Amino acid sequence: MEKTPKWIDVGLIPLLNLLIAFVISGIVVLLIGENPVQAIKVMIDGALGSPYGWGYTLFYATNFIFTGLAVAVAYHASQFNIGGEGQATLGGLGVALVCLAFPWPHWSIALLAAMIGGALFGAAWAAIPAYLQAKRGSHIVITTIMFNFIGASLLNYMLVNVLRPRGSMDPATARFPKSTYLPTFHDMPLIGQFFGKSVPANISFFIAVLACFLVWGLIWRTRLGYAIRAFGRSESAARYAGISPVKIVMAAMLISGALAGLMAINNVMGTGHRLVLNSVEGAGFIGIAVALMGRNHPFGVFLAALLFGFLYQGGGELALETTIPRELITVIQALVILFTGAFDNMLRAPIESFFVARANAKKEA
Amino acid sequence: MDFATIIELLDSAVRLGTPLLLACLAGLFSERAGIFDIGLEGKMLMAAFFSAAVAAVTGSAWLGLLAGIGGAMSLTLVHGLASITFRGNQLISGVAVNFLASGFTVLIAQSWFQQGGRTPQLSGNARFEPITLPGADAVKDVPVIGQIYDNLLSGHTILVYVAFAMVPLTWWVLFRTRFGLRLRAVGENPESVDTAGVSVIRLRYTAVAITGVLSGLAGTYLATGLAAGFVKEMTAGRGYIALAALIFAKWRPVPALGATMLFGLLEAISNRYPNIDLGVVNLPIQFMQAVPYILTVVILAGFIGKAIPPRAGGQPYVKER
């Protein structure tokens, strides 16, 4: 059987799908009586036109790298982890508990501890659905959806009844001690002079980039990664090769949950400096779009996260400067998921058959 | 708790359970035909918006109902194309449908009405008004039976009665008609249906079309019966609770009625009593809100009877060549 060239598979088809998603988004903008070209200008200007814009774009991208990697790792084991939202929520709880537990002497130590806390809580929230999938065959998509809601309720309870400081009306934790504040781009040598004080992008961005490399190494350069990919391709073949399904599903989902939980070092520890309700703001779901677009490769996830960071920040500017609500971003996100995910075969089937036919014709000639 | 309070709680359980029931039956048709549908939430939301928008503009709840069904249908078509024609991942398509609805409704609402993503308040004929069943006023003062008839059974909108009528109708269609037999077969073993010379594609499209109509009814009831207009994200997870109820009911119509009414009752209780003190433990409102989801996980885990989904669910059908 002839295979299509790789650049078509990972380059041309995703780009075409993306293009369709954006063209339809443009049509939607036209339909609500706005000018799509003007809208793109505002978005590019707002997200990439200034260090301020970049600071926000990279801040959002950091969230999406973590959640995108989370979806990607689970996907390699053919598990669709839709629970990134809940795992990131719980990760926030873990990070907040660590930050509040102890008067940390230095941010670097606090960061290490918070990473462990966030990852552990995120992994724990993925552990039950993973266990039920592995041991009892309960569909992981449904259980992780349910755990998103249970997680939201749990956080609500913790913030209102347990962690809220006395006398405060806000359902939020107390402010973290100053010593846990992470250095933002403004505080860093070399690049600090370009970024203003209010820029939220912080050191977590570099940890996210590091996570991309680590995930790449894990998936393609370790025994566990090999087992995960083998299991993801064919469960029965992996089983025959002596790979334990329970172990792989658990391992992949725990890593996935931990990655989603790690997001909290950016949005909770990096900027909010306290845990509030709904601090995740849908980033867990955007991770699905990011992983699909990035074709579950860490480098792809990185690029897709940058794109969504741009969309998110640009969308915010759009809502400020025009009458287009920021929900336009939700529509774009939906269309990206639809065309790069669910409608993937629409273009893939004809393009692939075209290349197979051409290759066969060449062979005969 | 006196009798009148119980009746009131049950009455509000019926109101709150109705959108869940309609959405649950909607999901039942789709999933029984082998198409997983986690996009019920989005379809309801779309229907809620279009029904409220058209009802607000035309002043007719009935035209709103048509628009609501149309809105849900458009998303059904997207899901059908993705999962039947393009043989894509049904779960991913469902996620996309939910986001599409969540963004699109606010975008259009803002463009049409400029009220921050909501429709104008509906009143008069733009809403479905409560129907007083015959004789309800006459028996109002009869103890117990009169109270039940007047306060619990009477005084709902037409959509509530339609929803309840859909339960036996769904049962009859699924288990007593040829169409129902084929629909169930296509969800369990599509090859056999194909071998019998029946089109799998057409059956599945029919099933998701029924899903579109029912989830359209569910969303319309939310916006024009239960509430008086559309507000952003007004489904608030009801589509997922309906999905939970569907699993809870093990994909059967009569248990679906029980499950959705139970979840409706839970919502009614937590609305009325934010904190429940059981003496030993104090159940916080957040726990009550999470109960449907926790119950579903427990059911899925197979600790209380096993929930086995239709066998061919989630798999695109590829005809042998």
Image: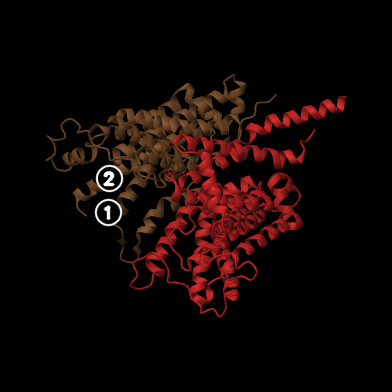
Chain colours: A red, B brown
| Three-letter code for the amino acid on which mark 1 is drawn | Arg
Q: Left or right of A121: which side holds A324?
A: left
Residue under label 1: B272
Q: What residue sits 26% from the left and 43% below the top?
A: B11
Q: How far, Cα to Cα, is label 2 from label 1?
A: 10 Å
Q: What residue sits 51% from the left and 35% below the top?
A: A27
Comparing A164 with A20, the one in front is A20
Residue B279 percent across, percent down from the top left: 30, 66
| Three-letter code for the amino acid on which mark 2 is drawn | Ser
Image quadrant occupied by the C terminus of chain B = top right
Q: Residue furthest right?
A: A365
Q: Say if mark 2 contacts mark 1, CB within 8 Å.
A: yes
Q: Are marks 2 and 1 on the same chain?
A: yes
* Crowd band around label 1 with a 10 angstrom C-alpha radius: few (<14), some (14–19), many (20+): few
Q: Left or right of B128: which side holds A109?
A: right
Secondary structure of residue under mark 2: helix
Q: Left or right of B43: which side holds A67?
A: right
**Chain assignment, label 1:** B
Residue under label 2: B12
Looking at the image, is mark 2 or mark 1 earlier in the sequence? 2
Secondary structure of residue under mark 1: helix
Comparing A218 with B123, the one in front is B123
Residue B154 percent across, percent down from the top left: 22, 36
